[in-house]
Image: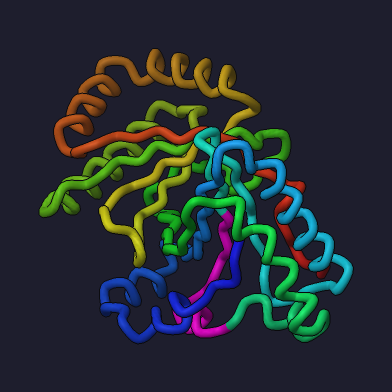
């Protein structure tokens, strides 16, 4: 993971009004995502660097920056940081740690990362609370459920309204049937080339998620099959990424 650089320093200057209105809505929570594509055989070294950064953050009681880490089975690592508005992107999120450690020691923390990834970058995801299905309350980090299945539904140009319509229909059907298959829906934001919905499903492991899917299909019945068919017609591509939330390399400041 790298300090958010010029991308974050210039982002606020080039945002269009549609992004700003989305971020300010009560229906959304905005996240900055930093994603590293780790080289084959370098994951252990990458995680060592993560742990060294985390150790420094805890020892110096770093404030102003928190992240939830996700390690995917495709050798990528994502770090999600919640923000309230785009103005936060104009700040160095690690400024507090840098001030406490000193610039030289701080920069050394990031040197090991450079040789562990093939590429990396930052982008925005918007948690869409209105179209997520979490009847017991919105929670990204449920205890004992660190396994994640992330399903990306890519939206063709001109099909956003239809995609939103299907998201509403899906939530309505799940509510009417009392489904136990909870999910959070995220919308792509600034920094992503494609428009997509990402549906995040939590579970104890892959087997529990698959079992839940089978039970949910039976519960939704013909209505679910019809909706699934409509979804396949509208979305241009569907991708699945699996992995686990990594508490051991995530950081939350002490209150």
Magenta residue check for 85: yes
Name the quadrant of the N terminus: bottom right
Residue 30: x %, y % from top left: 47, 65
Q: Does 234 sit above or below residue 225?
A: below
18 shown above or below 237: below
Q: In the displayed structure, does residue 237 sit left or right of residue 211?
A: left
Q: Position of residue 188 (x, y in %)?
A: 35, 56
Please give left or right for residue 207 compared with residue 183 in the image: right
Quarter of the figure with residue 82: bottom right
Tell me, yes or no, whether the highlighted magenta stretch contains residue 166: no
Quarter of the picture containing the C terminus is: bottom right
Q: Which residues are magenta?
A: 79-91
Q: Position of residue 201 (x, y in %)?
A: 50, 35
Q: 89 or 26, which lies in front?
A: 89
Q: Give the left or right position of residue 210, taking residue 147 as reference.
A: left
Residue name at image x 65 percent, y 37 percent: 146
Determine the residue positioned at 60% across, 60% down.
114
At 23% from the left edge and 28% from the top edge, which residue is drawn? 227
Q: Nearer the viewer, residue 17 or 215?
A: 17
Query: What x and y, as percent, mark residue 203?
Result: 60, 30
Which residue is the extreme one toward the right?
Answer: 59
> Image point 40% across, 37% down: which residue?
151
Q: Quadrant of residue 28?
A: bottom left
Seen in the picture, residue 224 relative to 233 is either above or below; the reply is above
């Amino acid at each position: 993971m790298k300090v958010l650089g010029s991308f974050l320093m210039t982002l606020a200057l080039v945002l269009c009004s549609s992004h700003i209105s989305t971020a300010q809505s009560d229906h959304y929570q905005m996240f900055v995502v930093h994603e590293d594509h780790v080289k084959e055989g370098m994951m252990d070294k990458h995680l060592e660097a993560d742990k060294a950064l985390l150790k420094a953050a805890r020892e110096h009681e770093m404030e102003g920056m928190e992240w939830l880490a996700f390690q995917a089975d495709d050798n990528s690592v994502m770090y999600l940081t919640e923000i309230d508005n785009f103005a936060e992107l104009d700040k160095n999120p690690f400024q507090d740690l840098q001030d406490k450690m000193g610039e030289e020691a701080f920069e050394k923390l990031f040197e090991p990362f450079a040789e562990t990834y093939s590429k990396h970058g930052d982008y925005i995801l918007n948690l869409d609370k209105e179209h997520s299905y979490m009847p017991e309350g919105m929670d990204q980090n449920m205890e004992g459920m660190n396994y994640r299945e992330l399903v990306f539904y890519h939206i063709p140009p001109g099909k956003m309204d239809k995609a939103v319509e299907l998201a509403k229909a899906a939530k309505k059907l799940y509510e009417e049937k009392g489904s136990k298959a909870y999910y959070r829906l995220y919308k792509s934001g600034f920094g992503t080339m494609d428009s997509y919905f990402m549906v995040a499903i939590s579970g104890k492991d892959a087997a529990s998620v698959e079992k839940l899917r089978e039970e949910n299909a039976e519960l939704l019945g013909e209505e679910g099959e019809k909706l699934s068919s409509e979804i396949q017609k509208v979305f241009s591509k569907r991708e699945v990424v699996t992995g686990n939330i990594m508490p051991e390399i995530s950081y939350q400041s002490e209150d």
